[in-house]
Each structure stands twice: as C-alpha cells, then as structure tokens.
Amino acid sequence: MAASCVNMRPRTFTLSHHGKQRTGTLLRWRSSMTIVSMSTNKIDIPIMVNGSNGKMGKAVIKAADSAGLQILPVSFGSPDESGQTIQVCGKDIKIHGPSEREGVLASVFDEHPDLIVVDYTVPAAVNDNADLYSKVGVPFVMGTTGGDRERLYKTVEDSKIYAVISPQMGKQVVAFLAAMEIMAEQFPGAFSGYSLQVLESHQAGKLDTSGTAKAVISCFQKLGVSFDMDEIQMIRDPKQQIEMVGVPEEHLSGHAFHMYHLTSPDQTVSFEFQHNVCGRSIYAEGTVDAVIFLAKKIQSKADKRIYNMIDVLREGKMR
C-alpha cells in the first residue's frame, strides 16, 4: 500500500534548433511517497550484484533487500577497489578485482546453484563480464550500457545461458518506448514534414548521449521526421538543469529528463512527449523484477534464453 503526495510546478526551458530558439514549459514534479510493505515473504533467489560500489549497484541492492532477495556478500569491481569491503543495507560486501573473477564466480555458483548475477559495472567491462558469465554458466541481468552489443548477444546465444539484457530497466520508460515502436510500425510517415526538437538532461557524469533518446528519435524517423542525432540538445551543466530544465537540486547527481517537441510545417500544430525521472529507484525496481522474471524462466526451463525488459513487461506479473 502506498500513500503519495505529488506537486506540479511549471518551469520554462529554451530549445535551440537550426539557429532558432523556442521557449516553453517543463513540468517540475516533486513527490513524496510512503510505502508500507504488505508482505514479509522472502524471495529465495541468491543474487550477486557486480558494480555494487556504484550508485546503480547500491540502488539495486537496496531494492533487492526490500523485495527479500538473498544478496550475496561478494561483488566484482575495478583493480583499485579490489579487497575493499563496503556496507549497503547493513550488509558487508567484499569487492574482488579482475584477476580473481573466475575463481570467485565459480565458487559462489557452486555454493548457490540458483545464483543470478546483476551487472551494473562499466561499458568497457560488458563483453569481458558476459564472456565470464557464459563460461561459468551463470544466468545474468545486464543493465550496463555500452560495449559491443552484437558480440554480447552472440556470446550469450552460443553459451545457451539465460539472461535479461536491457540498457533501459525503467519499466514505465520501456513501456513508453514500446508504444512508440508500435506507433512507428503501424503508422509510418504519420509525422512526415514535421520538425523535431529534442532536449535531454542527465547528471554531469554522463558524457554520452542518452540511448533512450536515440531510441525514441529512431521511432520518429520511421514516422517520417527528418532529424540527425547530433541535433539533440544535451544539458549537463547543473545551473542550466536547475534554471532551464527544472531538475530538483537534490537530484542533480541522478536524473533523466527528456522532452521531444514536434511542429508541423506551417507551425500551426505541435506535439510534445516528455518523461522525467528523478533518482535511480525506477531502474533498480525494474532490475529486481527482471531477476524474479528470469528465475521463473529458468525454473520452467523455457526454450527462449535471451530476454529484454519488453518480455518482462509482457509477463504482466511485476510487483
């Protein structure tokens, strides 16, 4: 059961497009939510969260702990983190460096044959980690972005292990993306001639362009809109994020604000699509659902082995 209070405040923003500027309004959402658990049932799924020293790793551990998953006290990290012990949700987790990975994983998997690994490391480690999970035979949920995705899928396919792979774990955002893809597939060219302006704001540490924004833009392109990815307006300056975009100051270190504005050729019709995320809980909760989903697929010995968050959504049994 959840009780929530939501306040909405309008904020102005300015988009630049082909030398022209447009001022509009972004809605600033502030919410507070109190959650009361209605169940204390423990979900007996052992998980190992790699990248547990990072912000997403810690968020996943907190969400998994709340859901009752069994969080194992081991994790993979960088060479500099090797040997460290961190504490998350009152649990001590020892971090192992690259040289120890295979031995540690094999030992943990031997002790916990129902193990599922959750990966929130770094893009440069995606393929090496997937190679290791496949070699040992451990199913995993990959939330880390980047890497050679084609190689990633081939590695998992060849090994025949179970995995959920998705660069976007936010369930509601994934549902929005799915709706966009359906519209693009069923109504190609519906927005032919329209111009598109895109603004996306993320924490300063995110140097690359949002993969979610690129996915949405590809749908608009199928709908007939002419737009180059380098036209995306990326906001990374904290001062602009507060004043122009309306990001709450407490979420400057972790947010994802997206706005897509479409205008007809004669400037008489416009459409706006917007999705704003503060914090990381939406991704952490989606990751926990992906773990539970994957455990059920493994238990039922499903023929399909590689899944994404669309598959998790279609299952319709999320918490």
Image (cartoon, helix red, strand yellow):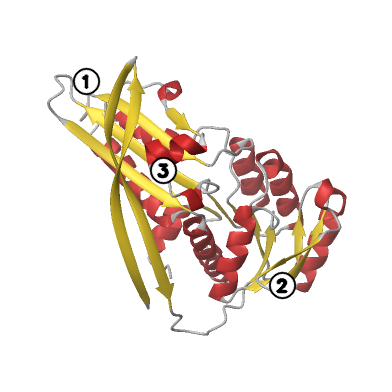
Whether residue 168 is visible here, answered yes or no, is: no
Between the residue at mark 3 and the residue at mark 1, the CA separation in whole angstroms equals 26 Å
At numbered mark 1, what does the secondary structure look like: helix, strand or loop?
Answer: loop
Q: In terms of depth relative to the viewer, which is nearer, 18 or 10?
A: 10
Front: mark 1 or 2: 2
Q: Report the side of 279 relative to 1 (left or right).
A: right
Instruction: Name the residue that disc number 1 marks.
Output: 193
Amino acid of disc 3? Phe
The picture places residue 20, in percent across and down from the top left corner, at 30, 17
Between the residue at mark 1 and the residue at mark 2, the CA separation in whole angstroms equals 56 Å
Q: Report the side of 253 relative to 130 (left or right).
A: left
On the image, which quarter does residue 319 sit in?
Answer: bottom left
Instruction: Work out whether 62 lies above or below 102.
Output: below
Amino acid of disc 2? Lys
Instruction: Name the residue that disc number 3 marks.
Output: 257
At numbered mark 2, what does the secondary structure look like: helix, strand or loop?
Answer: strand
The picture places residue 70, in percent across and down from the top left corner, at 65, 74
How busy is the neighbourhood of tag 1: few (under 14 within 10 Å), some, or many (20 plus)?
some
On the image, which quarter does residue 123 sit in?
Answer: top right
Residue 100, label in figure: none
How busy is the neighbourhood of tag 2: few (under 14 within 10 Å), some, or many (20 plus)?
some
Whether residue 97 is visible here, answered yes or no, is: yes
Instruction: Name the residue that disc number 2 marks.
Output: 91
Q: Earlier in the sequence, mark 3 or mark 1?
A: 1
Instruction: Work out whether 274 lies above or below 284.
Output: above
